[in-house]
Amino acid sequence: MLTNDNDRRIYEEELSPRLPQKLFDAHVHIWSKADYPADFRFPDKNCANRFGGEFTLSMWRDIMAELLPQQECHLNCFGMPNNAADRSKTPDGALPGDSINVLISPADAAELVEERIDRAGAVGVKPYWNYAAAFYGKTSNEVEINDMLTPQQLAMLDRKGLAVTLHIPRSGRFADKVNQRQMLELCEKYPNVRFVFAHIGRAYFMKNIYQSNIDDFVKYPNAYFDTAMLNHEGVLKYTFDHFPAERIVFGSDAPIAFLRGKSVEINDQYAYLMGEDYAVGTSIVDTKNAVNFTTFFYEQLRAILNTTPKGHVSDVLFNNAQRVFRKLGA
Ligand SMILES: [Zn+2]
């Protein structure tokens, strides 16, 4: 059992009256121990260990039934993009209405990725900076968006009309000019790829979204943002004020989102206040149980419900994603 009495009260009083009947989570990590070498272990306090070192689709379904008992839930999922993960494996047990993605490294030939996509019936790919770092021998700060996918891979994705969930690199995040330029170039050059910039470009605090030039993205119909791990109402409000709600999709970053905590802005930075002793990026753990936490997932839903423009709640929480994550010919 994940939820407690306080969570159930939040659902009954705050969420249930405002949530649509169907919810689509555009950003979920699903993996099993079988996707990793037998002797592989995540570091002790890594949040990947919270549910026993794996997070399968059936585990996800059980938790969603607890968190949103009255909703019909679907997801867009990919593995945990760890260097040790076997990228030929994709999440098992998707149901109609769910979508899956292939983990992709610049080391993977476009033909090989295409085979994996076709075999799995995937809707797109999930690159991650660490794969580019490993392939090009760069440090995390040296990786650029252009390192994360090869031109051959992008041409293949464009031909097939698939989606890319892109977690942008570099410490400046969405405020970084090199990132902005390369994001816009991708949208321009590959019009049939739907680029879902994860975590609203990782702009978890106001200064970052103020400097994002998000208005420049409006003219590219294939530019989307997911809201994974965003519970900052100011950032969400700014995003909705400057970008069409039709191209914002709710994402949670489960299973990380199923931990107890809240992301907070502190002096032009942000930190994860953790209600349990796991590391999620820059974390401050409430070792003394000073406050009662609910899950990041509920905090995110609260923030989305409080900021989504009137009439767009079902779009952001379900409908928009139906246009983004679709198979070839579907
Ligand atoms: Zn993620």
Image: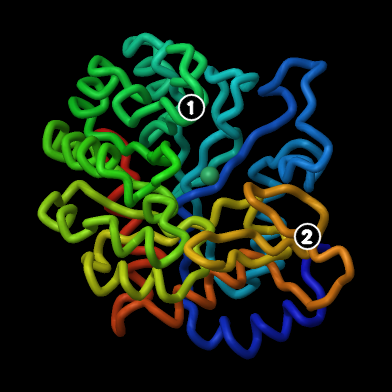
Tell me residue 248's x, y (percent): 32, 61
Q: Amino acid at mark 1?
A: Leu
Left-right relation of 152 to 90: left
Q: Is residue 151 above or below residue 173?
A: above
Q: Is residue 42 above or below residue 132?
A: below
Residue at 55% in and 47% down: 28
Residue at 23% in and 58% down: 214
Tell me residue 126's x, y (percent): 44, 33
Q: Earlier in the sequence, mark 1 or mark 2?
A: 1
Q: Which residue is identified by label 1?
A: 103
Q: Which residue is identified by label 2?
A: 285
Mark pair 1, 2: CA separation: 31 Å
Report the coloring of the rendering.
Answer: rainbow
Q: Amino acid at mark 2?
A: Val
Question: Which quadrant is home to the N terminus?
Answer: bottom right
Tell me residue 87's x, y (percent): 54, 20
Residue at 53% in and 77% down: 302
Check disc 1 and report its element: helix, strand or loop: strand
Crowd rating for badge 2 (residues with CA inside 10 Å; few <14, some 14–19, many 20+): some
Which mark is on residue 81? none
Left-right relation of 74 to 280: left
